[in-house]
Amino acid sequence: MQEEVKVRVGTPEDLDGIMNLALNVAKENGVFSPDINKVLSEVWPSLHQHFGIVGVIGEADKPLEGFVLLRIGQQWYNSNEILEERVVYVDKKFRSAKGGRARKLCEFSKKTADELGLPLIIGVMSNNRTEGKMRLYRRLFGPEVGCFFLYGAKTGNWQNEGALPQS
């Protein structure tokens, strides 16, 4: 019998696994080469629940299956706090596996927003399987409030141009 997929709160011990998945995200969906220090500056405080939180799927001593990075921020026009999703990502090896990992990570995001009493801003920015991702988000979050357009670039294309990760 297969165990139910569960999202747990990430801890500092998950850092290596999260950083590995973060580099995979950048390869698939990044517009530019990733800056490892920038990624670390978002992930590390969230692993300590300082203005953020990370939800992870998988055991701390094994490769992680997926993660969501949430940060507490503010909109450009006021000082009210809002929960901002930075990334929802499931490793390619687990995308077709039973358990609905992406859905579970999104549900973790909703639960976190509810517990914090904050609105959640979450979206899809990808040129890969975009419609399927949007259908999932509509089922979980309701109708979209707008959309993104990316002019002059394509997600995941930076690696075709020979760019190396920044450090």
Image (cartoon, helix red, strand yellow):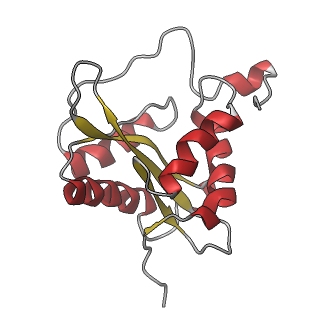
> How many numbered callouts?
0
Picture residue at 57% right of the left edge, 50% below the top: 44
- Compare residues 163 and 47 and report the one nearer the observer: 47
Q: Point out residue 56 in the picture as x, y percentages from the top left corner.
A: 50, 63
Provide residue 7's location: percent of width, then percent of height. 43, 68
User: In this view, which residue lies farthest toward the bottom?
Assistant: 1
Q: Residue at x 62, y 45 (%)?
A: 22
Q: Position of residue 1 (x, y in %)?
A: 48, 91
Q: Which of the 4 image quarters holds residue 79? A: top left
Residue 95 visible in the current orientation: no
Q: Is residue 79 above or below residue 140?
A: above
The answer to whether residue 110 is seen in the rendering is yes
- Give 149 or 6, whichever is nearer the viewer: 6
Q: Is residue 51 left or right of residue 30?
A: left
Compared with 124, 56 (above or below) is below
Residue at image position (20%, 43%) is: 119
Q: Position of residue 154 (x, y in %)?
A: 57, 20
Closest to the observer, 70 or 81 = 81
